[in-house]
Structures are given as C-alpha cells and as structure tokens.
Image (spheres, rainbow, N blue to C red):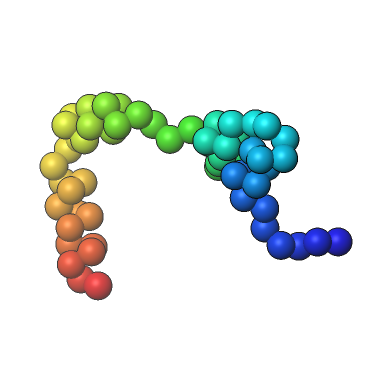
Amino acid sequence: MDTSPVSCRTLERFYHVDANTLEKQYKDVLSGRRAPSKSTVAYQNAHRDSGVFRDIFYALYSH
C-alpha cells in the first residue's frame, strides 16, 4: 500500500476536479464543522465581558 501523501493539485490533474474546492471540503470534513465567519467572531468579541480578555492576557503573560 502506498503511504505517500497526494495533493489536491495532483487529484485535480488526474480526475479533473477543482483542487481549491476539494481542499476546502476535505478540511471541512476533517474538522467536523466549519469555522465561524469573521463577522460573527468580531460581534462576539465586541459584546464579550472585558474580564475574558484580561484573563487571557495574564494567562499568556505568565508563560
């Protein structure tokens, strides 16, 4: 059995599929869910309690 990795570009060449779409769909399947949109994260951060950011800062600062 061949264990060397095959890129989406290689599959595109042989099977005439769109490599960008295939790569995105493959990542979505492996992660189990899609990442939230940037606007959703920005909204959540804007409405988050400032204590969360303070705690994260000190947790990172102490390392």
46 or 34, which lies in front? 34
Q: Is residue 5 left or right of residue 21?
A: right
Q: Residue 42, image x and y in percent?
A: 23, 32
Q: Residue 15, image x and y in percent?
A: 72, 35
What residue is shown at x 29% (from left), y 31% (from top)?
38
- Taking the view exactly as shown, the residue that stands out farthest to the right is 1
Residue 27 seen in this snapshot? yes
60 or 7, which lies in front? 7
- Taking the view exactly as shown, the residue that stands out farthest to the bottom is 63
Q: Is residue 31 left or right of residue 40?
A: right
In the rendered image, which quarter contains the C terminus?
Answer: bottom left
Q: Residue 8, image x and y in percent?
A: 61, 44
What residue is shown at x 15% (from left), y 52% (from top)?
54
24 or 59, which lies in front? 24
Q: Residue 30, image x and y in percent?
A: 60, 43
Quarter of the figure with residue 44: top left
In the rendered image, which quarter contains the N terminus?
Answer: bottom right
Quarter of the figure with residue 26: top right
